[in-house]
Image: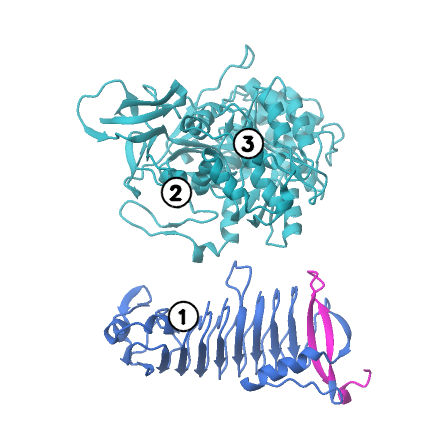
Amino acid sequence: MLRITGGTVYDPANGIDGEVKDLYIADGRFSSKFETGRTIDATGLVIMPGGVDVHTHVAGGSINFARAMTPEDHRRTQAFIRSKTRRSGLGGMAPTTFATGYLYAGMGWTTVNEAAVPVLSARHTHEELRDIPIVDKSSLVLMANNEIILDLLEEGEDERAKHILAWHIWAAKSYGVKAVNPGGVASWKYGNDAKHLTSKIDGYDHVTPGTIITKFAKMIDELGIPHPLHLHCNNLGAPGNVETTLETMRHLEGSRAHFAHLQYHAYGGDDWGNMRSEAAQLADYFNAHPNMTTDAGAVLFGDTVTITADGPWQHLLYKLTGRKWGNLDVENETGCGIVPYTYRPSNLVNAVQWAVGLELLLLINDPWRVFLSTDHPNGACFWRYPEIIQLLMCSDYRNECMANLPPNIKNKISLPEIDREYTLYEIATITSAGPSRALGLPQKGDLGIGKDADLVIYHQDHDIARMFGHPRYVFKGGEIVIEEGDIRETPDGREYLVQPSYDPEIDKFLRPLFEDRYCMSFENYPVEMERIERSQIQDCVTLGGEGE
Amino acid sequence: MNAITLRLRQEPVVALEAEVITPDRFAEMSHEEICSSIVYHGKRQLRLDEFFDVDGERSDQLILHGDLHRVRHLGRAMTRGSLTAHGDVGMHLGAHMKAGQIEVFGNASDWVGAEMSGGKIHVHGHAGQQVGAAYRGSLAGMKGGLIIIDGSAGIEVGMRMRRGTIVIGGPAKDFVGLQMKGGTIVLRDGAEIRAGAWMQRGTIISLKPLDMMPTFARSGLQNPTFISVYSSLLKPHGCELPNDAAAGGYLRYAGDRAVPGKGEILVWQEHSANEAY
């Protein structure tokens, strides 16, 4: 048992805003009473629930490809040297598995959601997730360009498509569904893209990105998956794409939806030269529609590597930058592109992107619906979150940073007019309580009795980036994992799964399709339960009287 | 200030990582401090005097003797002084060097002057691969300074170099100036295939005919003025470029158009050799 006394507690899930409160921990959970054990005096320190990352890329084929494409990190970034408590590894733009766990825990994050897993590489992804220590994990399966499902939607067989979707979620041992550029990645295999919701998808006559999005959101709600459709909209990164994003939001009225890395989908203008922020317009619509959540996908200046299932966009980015380009075609399921990238404050487009990420976080007024993310490693690496927190909490610092932007950025962004500053309570909401709720993980991001004892204790510090970058203690499942900047313990985290119900007869439908089209035999395709260590199956939910 | 002399007493069995051997470090060190500097023999940390007899202290003039072909990272990131080696040297000689001079009376291995940004390296013997190149994953190789190799060089001379000059006295192997972004490479004795592949900018000057890639466009016989300027600047280093219009001219090739790039390859041609021009 453990007791933490005298700390100033920020626990948005229970409406606790900076109260001095004692916390008791027994058997990995918060408890109402304390008998014997260690007492930690947290007087004068700040206590928050452990961070939850709703959208990150930390395991699987694409990030591994990115690691291989950035050998320079071996020379220039922090190396973890093996010690009694930890394995060796490498930080940098695409950290290795063990280092990923150390770096996340090192800044107080205790749960991460790997946001893009093709079923074909799900086994690999789970093997890597197992090697990410300390944090709890979940993963989302990429489905919106899966040709088996698109064929069924084309034929109007929506009910069967739903069972197939549920089958795939369980086959990948995932926690939810990610849709990336619906229809666009399928078209990419013909060298094209699908930029609008009415665009033609190569190989299909009836189904459009719009139908894919609405039907997926409906199927996921009907299946009662705890986390809603996790959507990477069409037309990412392009000037003027706010129209596509708003159209997508209108398509999803009445459904739950999580919009991933909204920053990349909030641009006006029609060319790189006149690209501007439309964050205000998007935030207005978003504020009025409580069915949606989003994560910022904020950008910070510096080197990173962009990885996404959005193959056509990555080809464009490669053409724009002339840097390296990696491209993967994942059979019937999806694609993947990787391009190392440097965001520069002197580059007008990058400067607009930097501003848009912050504008969205500041203009969306409900911190329960907008979450901190950089779409790691696309906008910046996750270990730079403390810098974003500083930008959100200090308008003076924001203005200082804005002084470095090119002068012709005036009238392209609205950040200079925003003077909102986040409070610690709101930071705890966007980093932990909010994303836990959106993920459907009620045991996370909450310091209430019976919840998982994942918490972080910070020094009060006027230097916000230092405060959030160097926690005094981090607890995971009631165990002290970080103390005074040192890794004390490296327990293995859990993996969250869902098991939606589906018609067992669906195997008979799928088997011949597999034998016809896949490189892998049907039996070898689903990930076996034995592959997942410390799995925990979350219950499906019932929404508004429908569902299962 | 007397020079510091290091004589190799015990030849390393495997690579000896000796990035401590730079004028910058030794300039402020006492004899004992130099002797106790850490070098890595494979994975073992050892004192420098396990391998070298050290003479002198507190100097930025270093003189090395012995077969140093397994001694790596000599003069790494040096910013002052000089390093002279009598004998062959190992990989990464003068990598990341910013200023000062390195002279080798012998052969050098791979990555001579990799990603250097200033100073001069003169190797009187042959050099290995990737002279003045970018390390794997880096966007730019050599960013300034001068490298002179009297002998031959291996593949990828000046790979991704951005600025500076490389002179190769003997023949170079494949992929001279691979992905070159700027700077100048002088090939006094030609090169093997695929010179200038993916080059974006910069100049390769060859005094011997080259086997050109099809993605380079021939654009006339010229005698550019800058050749005489370069020639006078290189003359003190023992390299002259022919620039007598009466004797011949430079065949200019533009490319690499596969990128597409704005680089140029100039190949010296005596008039008698090609009556077509």
Q: Are the residues flagged by discs 2 and 3 in contact, CB closer than 8 Å?
A: no
Q: Which chain hosts label 3?
A: A
Q: Is residue A159 above or below residue A106?
A: above
Q: Earlier in the sequence, mark 2 or mark 3?
A: 2
User: CA separation, marks 2 and 3?
Assistant: 32 Å
Q: Which residue is mark 2?
A: A103
Q: Which residue is mark 3?
A: A418
Tell me the crowding category of disc 3: few under 14, some 14 to 19, or many 20 or more residues within 10 angstroms, Cα based.
few
The magenta-colored residue range is B249-277
Count of all numbered marks drawn on residues in the image: 3
Residue B194 in view, yes or no: no
Quarter of image, res A35: top left
**In x, y percent, where is residue B42?**
33, 66
Chain drawn in blue: B
Q: Is residue A101 above or below residue B145?
A: above
Q: Are the residues flagged by discs 1 and 3 in contact, CB closer than 8 Å?
A: no
The secondary element bearing badge 3 is classed as loop
- Look at label 1 and name its amino acid: His
In the picture provided, is A2 more to the left or to the right than A497? left
Q: Which residue is mark 1?
A: B73
**In x, y percent, where is residue B210?**
68, 77
The colour chain A appears in is cyan
Tell me the crowding category of disc 2: few under 14, some 14 to 19, or many 20 or more residues within 10 angstroms, Cα based.
some
Q: Does the magenta-highlighted stretch encompass residue A51?
A: no
Q: Which chain hosts label 2?
A: A
**Most distant residue in the right direction:** B276
